[in-house]
Amino acid sequence: MTTVHRERVSILPLLLINFVGTLGFSIVLPFLVFLVTDFGGNALVYGILSATYPAFQLIGAPLLGRWSDVYGRRKILLVSHIGTLAGWIIFLVALFLPVNDLFNVNSAFMGTFVITLPLAVLFLARAVDGLTGGNVSVADAYVADISSDENRSRNFGKMGMASNLGFVIGPALAGILGATIYGEVLPVLVALILSLVVLVVIIFVLKESKSSIITQIPEKENVGKVFAFECKECYKAANPKRLKLRDVFKLKYISFLLILYFLIFIGFNIFYTAFPIHAVSGLGWTVTEMGVFYAVLSGIMILVQGPVLRRALKRFSEEKLVIIGSAVLGSNFVLFISSEFSLIYLAAVLFAVGNGLMWPSIMSILSKRAGTIYQGAVQGVAGSVTGVASIIGLTTGGLLYNAFGGLTFLVSAGVIFAVFVLSFRLLRYKE
């Protein structure tokens, strides 16, 4: 397959795909926790439902990442979004099913909840979407394909801006549409239609992009020099079909970067489970208030990942931005313990600043270390790592909130502060 030259490929179709895909996902965030409780679930069930997507993504993402190296990014993105469309169709069907009890649970450890028929179908919808949910990893690999070292961070920042714009509009739409007589049906229907839009863009607008099959062999710490048989300028035509996932760990520093990925997603996902439950049960928020919060949070992220990130990159290296961002991000989680309106929104500002500086920077560092031929495979393995972290974080977040309430946010803070300490090692890597 022919490699598309970097300068000839526009990032605009990918930004649109990212925006629409994120909008479709975020449109259900304000009311999903209400939907779970209405169908008989509790905080633990909400966490497990949230973890269903990454659990099945753990199976699909590495394969889709490898296949994108072999068959091209566009084809795999098409497969992924077909799965997303199927997931939304099943989700919509669940809303019209009778709320029949399947079984009850009454446990001191897990709490009291009921698994009903529509709740079970919601789990199926998330599983189908997750199994084909390698679209983010493949999209990141696509961006890496068409980026140079000079514009790589800016391109990942644009991807973050597109996602966050979707997160602004999605919850806002949910607040408006969810207040109608159609309730949750209308936002889910909009998400389904937007998934169709993504498919149209992929089929008719997005060009193919695939990494070159001519690449350097991963360096193995120059061990060949010791035995005096080191090859100079050893290049060969690598066959992507023969690549094994473990090969990505032979690339320098990849393992450490994946550890940072893992910890970041642990901290994020404990928060992502605990906060909606806290907002409903602890703060008494409505769907509209949830929508406004998510919209404001994402709006600030757009500002940070746009002009703020561009200016920051002129003064600081990506490695330093990871350190600065993780310090700010860890601090925000402490403030979420409070029930004060002003402190919660201050925490949202710190969350946006920390995440907006840290996440595009660490994504850019990983893509640089991945090289060319392994780009899709590395992003796929990164998707699996984040999937494991999401499963652990989302389910643990539900259990912790059941036991400790708002103090759960201190666990998220501790994990992100651990990332802050470990990130100083990145400065040595840069040297």
Image (spheres, rainbow, N blue to C red):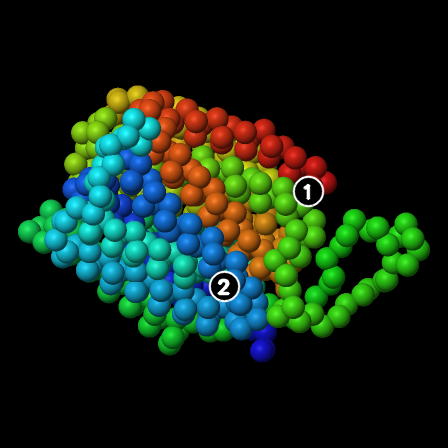
Q: Is residue 283 left or right of residue 413?
A: left
Q: Quadrant of residue 106?
A: top left
Along the viewing direction, whichever of 55 and 156 lies nearer the viewer: 55
Mark 2 surroundings: few (<14), some (14-19) or many (≥20) residues within 10 A = many
Q: Is residue 44 visible?
A: yes
Q: Residue placed at 28% from the left, 35% from the top?
A: 43
Numbered marks: total: 2
Along the viewing direction, whichever of 271 and 167 lies nearer the viewer: 271
The circle drawn on residue 64 is 2
Q: Amino acid at mark 2?
A: Leu
Using the image, determine if residue 94 lies above or below residue 385.
Answer: below
Image coords of residue 125 (percent x, y): 29, 57
Q: Residue placed at 37% from the left, 51% from the top?
A: 53
Image coords of residue 293 (percent x, y): 26, 37
Q: Secondary structure at mark 1?
A: helix
- Determine which residue is flagged by label 1: 430
Image coords of residue 94 (percent x, y): 20, 56
Q: Quadrant of the C terminus?
A: top right
Q: Quadrant of residue 92?
A: bottom left
Which residue appears farthest toward the left when viewing the image? 181
Q: Is residue 352 visible?
A: no
Mark 1 surroundings: few (<14), some (14-19) or many (≥20) residues within 10 A = few
The circle drawn on residue 300 is none
Image coords of residue 193 (percent x, y): 24, 65
Between discs 1 and 2, the one toward the N terminus? 2
Along the viewing direction, whichever of 273 and 372 lies nearer the viewer: 273
Q: Residue placed at 25% from the left, 54% from the top?
A: 121
Q: Is residue 223 left or right of residue 9?
A: right
Q: Secondary structure at mark 2?
A: helix
